[in-house]
Image (cartoon, grey):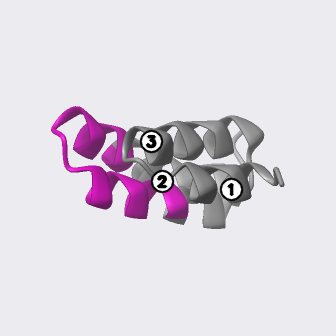
Amino acid sequence: MADDGERATRPHLLLGRAYGREGENEKALGELRMALWCRDDPVLRREIADLLRAMGRGEEARRVLGEP
């Protein structure tokens, strides 16, 4: 059974991905960050970093991944 973090994360994750498909990158980023806030997950961190890189925000992407 999913824990509370997973249940809270899912709607934000789905919205973030939907916004991303529509090219609404800022909205996508906001939803994905909210999902990460609900539950820290390395796969989600990678997804956020990939989006940031696509937006030309490489330094911010490295920070999300904890890279120097």
Residue 51 disc label:
3
Contact, CB < 8 Å: mark 2 with mark 1? no
Nearer the observer: mark 2 or 1; the answer is 2
Of mark 3 and mark 2, the one earlier in the sequence is: 3
For the point 74% across and 55% down, the residue is 40
**Which residue type carries mark 3?**
Leu
Residues 50 and 57: in front is 57
Asked if the stretch drawn in magenta spans residue 55, the answer is no
Residue 47 in the figure: left or right of residue 5: left
x and y percentages locating residue 56 in the rendered image: 41, 47
Q: Which residues are magenta?
A: 15-33
For the point 69% across and 50% down, the residue is 62
Residue 64 disc label:
1
Question: Visible in this render: residue 65?
Answer: yes
For the point 28% across and 60% down, the residue is 27
Identify the element where label 1 is drawn. helix
From this view, report whether residue 47 is shown above or below residue 34. Answer: above
Residue corresponding to mark 2: 57
Contact, CB < 8 Å: mark 3 with mark 2? no
For the point 41% across and 51% down, the residue is 11
Question: Among all residues in the image, which is located at the extreme left?
Answer: 22
